[in-house]
Each structure stands twice: as C-alpha cells, then as structure tokens.
Image: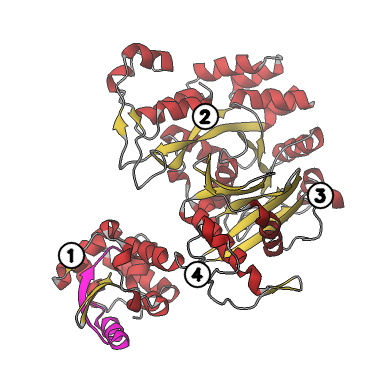
C-alpha cells in the first residue's frame, strides 16, 4: 500500500482526533516515500502509539484484537511460514482452521494487501488486529530463530549435522568449505542471540579442557554456551575471517570489525579484539548499535536539573565538557548524544576516537593510529587548523593532549572529552596531576559528568522491599526523604534476566563554579572540591543512585554495586 493521506485508516484516525491532520499530512507528504506502509510511518515518526493505533484499527473494522505478548510462536503453521510474503505485507498467519487462517494485521482497512495474502496462500483470512511493534518483534523472532538452528552437545558430531546449504562466500580469498558450515551457523546464531538479548559484548574463551562463550547483559557476564574445546581453533578462525584479520597470525593481538546486516534498514557493527592466551586466542566482540547514540538526552536517565546543566554547557560557544567513569559506564553514549544535539549544518564538528565506534553522519570522525603517528594530540593540532566549532577527543591520556584540548577550549572552541576517574571532583585533580597548570584548569573546564550504569528493575516482576528506617538511613537516605522512600527488589520472570531488564544512568553533573575555580587556584584537593559541590547542591553518584532507587528504577543492591556504597 502506498503511504497516502487518502487511506481509510488515515481518515478515520484524523476523525477520531488521534492524529493532528495538518501535521500528519505534512509528514506523510514529506516522508511517505521512505516507508513501506502507513502504520510504519505513523509509529516511526511517533505520531501515534502502537497500542492506540491497534485499538482504533480494531474499532474501525469491528475486528477482534490480540495481544501478541501472550502468543506462542509455535502455533504459526509451518506451511504458512513464508518469510518473503510476511515481510512484504507486514501480515502473519497465526493459525489455520480448514480453508481459513487467522491473519495478524496492523491495518485491517488495507483490503488489497489482505486479498493478495489470501491469493498467495489459497486460504480465506479472518483478520486479527495486533500492535505494530509486537507484530514485528514476533516476525523477527520467528524467522531469525531459523538462522543457525539449535545446538546441543550431541549436535557437535560434524559429520551428522544437517545444516542448510548456504551461498558460497569468499573472504580474503578463502572459500568456505562445506565442513565449516556448522561453525558458520553456530557463530551466526551466537551473534543473533546476543543482539536479541541486548548484550553489549560477546566473549569467546578457550581453556585447557573447556571452551566457554559469555554475553555481557546489562553489565553482567552470563555463560551462554560451552562448545567442545576441540573446535576452539575453527571458531577463532571463522571470527577472524569475518573480521578481515590475519588468520595465520596467532602470536599478537589484532583488531577488526564485522557488519551484520539484519534487514534492508537495520545493520549492527561488531568491534572485534583478539588476544593470544595460554590455550588459544580469546576473542571479544563489542556490539556497536548506532541506535544507542540516537536515544536522545531525555531517555538517558538524567534528572531534570542535571539535563539542563548539560544542555546549558552544550549551548556555550567555548569551554570543556568532561565525561568520566570506568569502561562500560556509558561515556560514549553521553558524548554522542551531546554531539547529536550540536550536529547542525551551521556547525563544524571533528572527533578523534580510538576506535571510532559509531558512524555519525555530518561529523568528521578520525580514527587515531599511534603507529602511524596519528595520535590524539596530532589529530587535535590538525583540527585547530580546520576552523572547528566543536571538537571531541575520545580520551585525554597525557599532558600533551590535555594542553592542546585546553588551549582549544580557551580560544573559542567547545571541547568534549573523557577521563577515567571515579568522581567529578577527582577529574579536576587528575588534570592537575598530569601537569596542567591550575589556572588553565580553572579557566577552561565548564562541566564534568561522572556516570555509572545500573541495571534497571524489570517492571513486570519487581516487588517492594521492606527495610527498617535505620537501614535506609545507613544506606544514605536523609530523614526528610524517608516518608517518600519506597524501594524495590528484583525477582525474575520470563521478561527479564534475574529481575533486571536494561540499564539506567546514574550521574554526578558538576558545573565548575567560581568558588570551585578559587579552590583549584589555591591548591585544594578533590575532597575540598567535593565539599563545595555539596554546598552548591550537586548530587554525588551515591545520592543520584538513591534517587533512582527511591523512584523504583533500580534496587539498593544495584546502587551499592555501581557506586561502591
């Protein structure tokens, strides 16, 4: 169906007041050609929520509706699992009865496509209205689950595995042998499983008598598979071929990338690192999803006042914004979110990164290469000769980089960068310890964000946790907070991992005030700066974590884990 404002569904949604007619018409006119159908456009452009669309569509057509969260995928008839037809039409047969099928649709007024589905299957359709996002989730689950099959320990008899014939592929001049197809299928399954489970990293680890594959999900490693150790060499070789690495070199670490195309509009990049260990090569894959860099500041977990401080600092024409925290604390997403806000046609933005994790259109990204002499410092020097407005340095690691970054911040440029420190006040003293003069630190740094990522409690199964007031006070809540404090604990259900699903940011957002600058100039330490920050109302990481716990977003145990409380 062409995306058009003349469709029955569009007209009825406007009549019901669920769409702003003028706004929706403009978006359909401007962007209609980019989308397969009207529901896709409405949901993607956030003109209407998926559940609202489903309720309205069911009412318009007088069709029954179904919540696919409670639908068992095994009920989809094998003979009707036509992926090409399903993805083309955005419709899925949920069951069959005689010469009829129950057909899940989002737009029941799209009669032409429903009739096309009937013609292709030879069955009459009984329409069932479902939510757009849940339908696509079920479709992806149904067809992705067939990639790679299921692997049990007995399946590793390579001579008896029945893997479907794949297209021949050639990488680095190495043609895939039929014997390697089980390995290819297994690795494809691991990559897809990691994406489905929301993992951030995959670890392929060889040991003397075992081989283990672990996923990092919500910041915690979980063992997912244990293939026979005899396959260690073949698994690492396949991963290195996919990453365009030298499969013959096993003595030194190597770095590479993989792009996995999931659909016509969706692909995922993996950053691959190999490390020679005592029993073979350990390979770690970091999942780089560009969607994470486009989340928007509203969903990162900043409190309202913290968000405004970040936005105010981004609006300044010069100065330095530093994001600090350990590896895996979400610093890259915070920086990319800031860059996305600044990324306009009027702004010249350059970044030096090691490595470039996510490609951002409209931003000049440079991959540093110390072996070739392209360091953070040399990239920064080059940036300053190219009329930049905004400069992002992946990490300030040494005095030379720090001095050039501070010089840029003092001469009309906005500089964003990261440091590895435990708190915002410690970031200032780290710069001083590097050898940066105190007057340069005091005059150039405008905002410091220290952050952690805590696991988010599952909204389906979390339960209230009853704690005595004395314990709440010991945890750090104030007597004034106690009447409004209600904390929750994880339970665990089919929708989550051990009671948690996703992560939420915990932040310490500290603007460098005039009084803090005085403390720096007078040789004060991080404790003096932290005391002044508390006086000025800046919540430290622990206090911000307790706010998240009191809001039911995470547990006290998780706050203790990430803030070392």
For label 1, the residue is: 16
Q: Residues within 10 Å of mark 4 (few under 14, many from 20)?
A: few
Say which mark, if any, is on residue 263: 4
Which of pointers 3 and 4 indicates the residue nearer the eye?
3
Answer with mark 1 or mark 4, whichever residue precedes in sequence.
1
Mark 3–mark 1 Cα distance, whole angstroms, equals 65 Å
Q: What is the crowding at mark 2: few (fewer than 14 residues within 10 Å), some, or many (at least 20)?
A: some
Q: Which residue is mark 2?
A: 562
The answer to which quarter of the image holds residue 316 is: top right
Magenta-drawn stretch contains 113: yes
Q: Residue furthest top?
A: 470
What is the span of residues highlighted in magenta in the rendered image?
108-131
Q: Nearer the viewer, mark 3 or mark 1?
A: 3
Q: Which one is earlier in the sequence, the residue at label 3 or at label 4?
A: 3
Q: Upstream in the sequence, badge 2 or badge 4?
A: 4
The earlier-in-sequence mark between 2 and 1 is 1
* Residue at horizontal 47 percent and vertical 42 percent from the top: 300
| Residue that mark 3 sits on | 252
Residue 254: give x, y in percent of width and height: 76, 52
Looking at the rendered structure, which numbered label has been put on residue 501? none
């Amino acid at each position: 169906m062409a995306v058009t404002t003349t469709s029955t569904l569009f007209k009825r949604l406007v009549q019901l007041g669920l769409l702003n007619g003028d706004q929706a018409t403009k978006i359909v006119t401007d962007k209609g050609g980019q989308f397969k159908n009207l529901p896709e456009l409405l949901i993607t452009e956030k003109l209407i929520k998926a559940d609202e669309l489903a309720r309205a569509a069911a009412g318009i057509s007088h069709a029954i509706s179904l919540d696919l969260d409670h639908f068992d995928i095994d009920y989809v008839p094998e003979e009707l699992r036509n992926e090409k037809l399903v993805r083309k039409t955005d419709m899925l047969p949920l069951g069959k009865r005689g010469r009829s099928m129950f057909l899940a649709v989002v737009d029941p007024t799209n009669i032409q496509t429903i009739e096309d589905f009937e013609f292709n299957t030879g069955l009459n359709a009984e329409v069932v209205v479902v939510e757009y996002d849940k339908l696509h989730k079920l479709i992806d689950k149904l067809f992705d689950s067939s990639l790679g099959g299921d692997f049990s320990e007995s399946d590793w008899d390579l001579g008896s595995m029945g893997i479907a014939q794949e297209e021949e592929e050639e990488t680095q001049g190495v043609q895939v042998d039929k014997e390697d197809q089980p390995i290819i299928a297994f690795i494809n399954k691991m990559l897809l499983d990691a994406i489905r489970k929301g993992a951030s990293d995959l670890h392929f680890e060889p040991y003397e008598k075992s081989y283990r594959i672990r996923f990092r999900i919500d910041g915690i490693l979980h063992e997912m598979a244990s293939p026979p150790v005899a396959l260690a060499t073949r698994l690492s070789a396949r991963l290195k071929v996919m990453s365009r690495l030298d499969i013959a070199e096993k003595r030194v670490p190597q770095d590479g990338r993989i792009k996995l195309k999931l659909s016509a509009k969706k692909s995922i990049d993996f950053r691959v690192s190999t490390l020679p260990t005592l029993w073979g090569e350990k390979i770690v894959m970091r999942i780089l999803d560009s969607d994470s860099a486009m989340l928007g500041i509203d969903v990162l977990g900043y409190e309202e006042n913290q968000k405004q401080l970040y936005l105010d600092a981004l609006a300044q024409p010069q100065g330095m914004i530093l994001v600090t925290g350990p590896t895996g604390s979400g610093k890259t997403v915070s920086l990319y979110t800031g860059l996305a806000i600044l990324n306009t046609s009027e702004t010249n933005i350059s970044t030096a990164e090691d490595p470039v994790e996510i490609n951002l259109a409209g931003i000049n990204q440079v991959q540093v290469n110390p072996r070739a002499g392209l360091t953070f410092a040399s990239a920064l020097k080059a940036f300053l000769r190219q009329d930049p407005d905004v400069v992002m340095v992946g990490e300030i690691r040494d005095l030379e980089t720090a001095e050039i970054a501070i010089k840029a911040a003092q001469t009309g440029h906005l500089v964003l960068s990261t440091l590895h420190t435990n708190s915002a006040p410690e970031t200032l003293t780290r710069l001083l310890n590097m050898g940066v003069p105190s007057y340069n630190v005091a005059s150039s740094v405008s905002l410091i964000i220290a952050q952690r990522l805590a696991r988010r409690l599952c909204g389906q199964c979390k339960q209230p946790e009853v704690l005595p007031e004395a314990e709440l006070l010991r945890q750090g809540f104030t007597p004034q907070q106690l009447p409004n404090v209600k904390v929750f604990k994880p339970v665990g259900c089919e929708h989550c991992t051990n009671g948690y699903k996703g992560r939420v940011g915990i932040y310490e957002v500290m603007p460098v005030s005039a009084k803090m600058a005085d403390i720096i100039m007078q040789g004060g330490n991080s404790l003096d700066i932290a005391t002044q920050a508390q006086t000025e109302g800046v919540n430290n990481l622990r206090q911000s974590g307790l706010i998240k716990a009191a809001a039911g977003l995470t547990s006290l145990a998780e706050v203790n884990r990430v803030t070392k409380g």
